[in-house]
């Protein structure tokens, strides 16, 4: 416990960590103030007009589905005969849509919590991922570069215990900050929606979906934190982690993507780490494979494919675990002086 307490004190005393927390609060305040300034509570007339527009669109969807079913039955249906209808009428079934039109979709100049909470949460998760990576890299990188780890080993001469305690303390602190910040973030925007906006239709499905994004975001923050910690441990400097990420983005995510397109490699997105990050956060992402339909001359060809959160999580966890295992193995044998 003394070692954990010492690491917590060292972490909270770092000026870089304090600066990142201040920047988090500043971004929080600016986003909330901008939202509050650009929103207003909808009047009864605005709500009534939005409800009519939503009901009209829903009725149009139902008529389109009914027209498609009538076509399959060979029955005449009044309306636009030139309207495109898919082969499978289930594509038009309103009951199978992810969401139906609601009044909140037709309100302008109004902050609607149910429409904007998820994008706002993605924005916060992106910052927290950057926060965790930079704090994780600087936390161990500065100690290795300044000799702080050597001084610590004189007090507790067990390398793996010291490094494991550092990593565990770091992950616990980042998780605490991230959880509290995201909860305060969502509560603040919920209050803004109540006093200067529109909450929108909230139900169990909405809160479940938002909670799933929040949970996946926290896991991604922890993985990014551990990755920054591991790369900085291997490189002995904070800059090693920053350089590794910059090199990967430029060489592979940008340059490699261009080369794969030139070579016409099938499903190149499956080779990009960014695709798995997106799939993990969103639960599922769809891509288009331009090479899938080149040999198809007749009929319909669907060149789309999806990445789901299960393989995305496996890739991210295996990558992080591999980097951490390598960092611990190097730290165990390397000369620290």
Image (cartoon, rainbow, N blue to C red):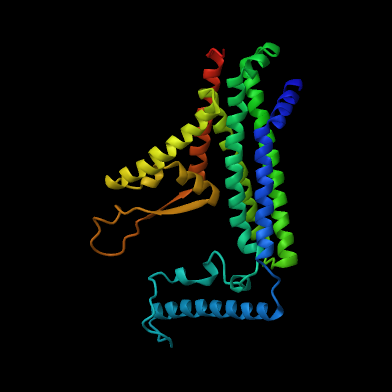
Q: Residue at x 72, y 56 (%)?
A: 188
Q: Residue at x 31, y 60 (%)?
A: 301
Q: Which residue is pictured at 62% across the width and 17% down the height?
A: 147
From the viewer's perspective, tell me whether residue 64 is left or right of residue 115.
Answer: left
Q: Is residue 294 left or right of residue 59?
A: left
Is 203 situated left or right of 127 in this image? right
Which quadrant would the C terminus be assigned to in this image? top right
Residue 45 locus on image (x, y percent): 68, 81
* Location of residue 283 with respect to 320 vertically, above or below: below
Seen from the viewer's position, the closer of residues 17 and 129 is 17
Q: Is residue 50 visible?
A: yes
> Seen in the image, is 115 located left or right of residue 8?
left
Q: Nearer the viewer, residue 190 or 10?
A: 10
- Image coordinates of residue 332 in percent, x first then y, are 56, 15
Residue 128: x and y, percent? 61, 43
Task: Determine if residue 222 is in view.
Answer: no
Circle count: 0
x, y percentage for residue 66?
A: 47, 79
Q: Residue at x 38, y 76 (%)?
A: 84
Q: Which quadrant is home to the N terminus?
A: top right
Vertical relation: 147 (above or below) 99: above
Image quadrant where residue 336 sits = top right
- Quarter assignment of residue 18: top right
């Amino acid at each position: 416990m003394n070692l954990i307490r010492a690491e917590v004190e060292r972490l909270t005393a770092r000026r870089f960590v304090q600066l990142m927390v201040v920047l988090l609060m500043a971004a929080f305040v600016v986003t909330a103030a901008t939202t509050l300034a650009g929103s207003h509570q909808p009047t009864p007339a605005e709500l009534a007009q939005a409800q009519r527009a939503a009901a009209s669109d829903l009725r149009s969807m139902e008529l389109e589905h009914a027209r498609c079913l009538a076509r399959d039955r060979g029955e005449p249906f009044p309306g636009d005969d030139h309207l495109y209808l898919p082969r499978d009428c289930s594509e038009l079934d309103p009951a199978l849509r992810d969401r139906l039109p609601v009044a909140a979709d037709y309100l302008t100049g109004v902050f609607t919590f149910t429409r904007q909470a998820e994008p706002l949460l993605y924005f916060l998760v992106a910052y927290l991922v950057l926060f965790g990576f930079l704090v994780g890299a600087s936390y161990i990188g500065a100690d290795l570069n300044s000799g702080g780890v050597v001084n610590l080993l004189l007090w507790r001469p067990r390398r793996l215990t010291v490094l494991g305690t550092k990593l565990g303390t770091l992950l616990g602190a980042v998780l605490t900050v991230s959880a509290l910040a995201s909860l305060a973030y969502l509560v603040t925007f919920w209050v803004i929606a109540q006093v200067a906006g529109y909450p929108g239709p909230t139900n169990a499905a909405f809160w479940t979906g938002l909670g799933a994004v929040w949970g996946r975001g926290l896991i991604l923050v922890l993985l990014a934190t551990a990755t920054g910690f591991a790369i900085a441990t291997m490189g002995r400097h904070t800059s090693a982690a920053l350089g590794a990420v910059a090199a990967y983005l430029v060489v592979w995510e940008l340059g490699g993507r261009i080369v794969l397109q030139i070579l016409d490699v099938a499903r190149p997105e499956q080779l990009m780490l960014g695709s798995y990050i997106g799939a993990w956060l969103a639960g599922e992402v769809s891509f288009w494979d331009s090479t899938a339909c080149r040999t198809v001359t007749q009929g319909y060809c669907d060149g789309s494919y999806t990445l789901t959160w299960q393989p995305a999580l496996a890739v991210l966890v295996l990558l992080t675990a591999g980097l951490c295992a390598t960092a611990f193995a190097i730290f165990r044998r390397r000369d620290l002086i």
